[in-house]
Image: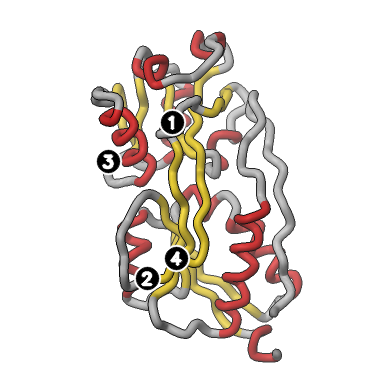
Amino acid sequence: LAAQRYGVVRIAALPSVAAGPLPDVIAAFRAANPRVTFVLKDVITKRVLSLVRTEEVDLGVLGGDFVAPDLDIVHTAQDRMHVVFPTEHPIGAVPEITLDVLASHPLILMDPDTSVRAIVDGAFIAAGRLPIPACEATYMMTAVGMVRAGLGITILPASAHEIRAEPDLVARAIDDPRFVRPIAVVRKRPRTLPPAAENFMAALVDYLGDRDSEPKRGGHRSKRAKARGTPR
């Protein structure tokens, strides 16, 4: 039991998860286990996979579809895509946010190497269309800044705190099931994790399973569930 209360937990996670739900889970876990420390690497999915495989981290949180027989998927969730736009933008008046509605406005899209872009591209291609970006950005906050400047609208996941960071912007869920990003918590197979990492993984799975990640329309913060911090 004492071994579970000490140690270092190393995690690689998508930036939207690393800046969104993960700090809450870590804070709750450290409240019960103050001698456990954390190393958090916020990187894109390809890098998450690499860090888990080389055992530079204990756990990975990544997005999109992937095939990895050398990894155990310990939990899966869904991250719904939202369109982010200025409060006075005409898209706010439409009853449903469809792919055709999105395509009728200048799009600020994420970098092609990101899991968010893969979801957007896949949805457009499935509909027989190609997304044509007015601008591209590597970081979500940069995309939000471009929206604020009036350059277009952007598509970001519900887990991204950036969609609630600007009071003059609105985030609305896209009414199309193709705009959903799978999220997975993974570990290397058949590696045995240190006790602290094993217990934090359980707390993270509990949190992701319980939380409501949908932001309220108009940019309000979503309800967050409490993470389990006690070792088990």
Mark sitting earlier along the chain (1/4): 4
Residue identifier under label 4: 73
Residue identifier under label 2: 71
Q: Are marks 4 and 2 in contact (CB under 8 Å)?
A: yes
Q: Nearer the viewer, mark 2 or mark 3?
A: 2
Residue identifier under label 1: 155
Cα–Cα span, label 4 and label 2: 6 Å
Query: Which of the image's four quarters has the N terminus?
Result: bottom right
Residue at 35% in and 23% down: 107
Q: Nearer the viewer, mark 2 or mark 1?
A: 2
State the image quarter where residue 26 is shown: bottom right
Cα–Cα span, label 1 and label 3: 13 Å
Mark sitting earlier along the chain (1/3): 3
Query: Which of the image's four quarters has the C terminus?
Result: bottom right
Residue identifier under label 3: 112
Asked if residue 178 lies left or right of residue 26, the reply is left
Crowd around label 2: few <14 · some 14–19 · many ≥20 (10 Å)? some
- Say which amino acid is labelled 3: Pro
Crowd around label 1: few <14 · some 14–19 · many ≥20 (10 Å)? many
User: Residue 61, image x and y in percent?
Assistant: 46, 60
Crowd around label 4: few <14 · some 14–19 · many ≥20 (10 Å)? some
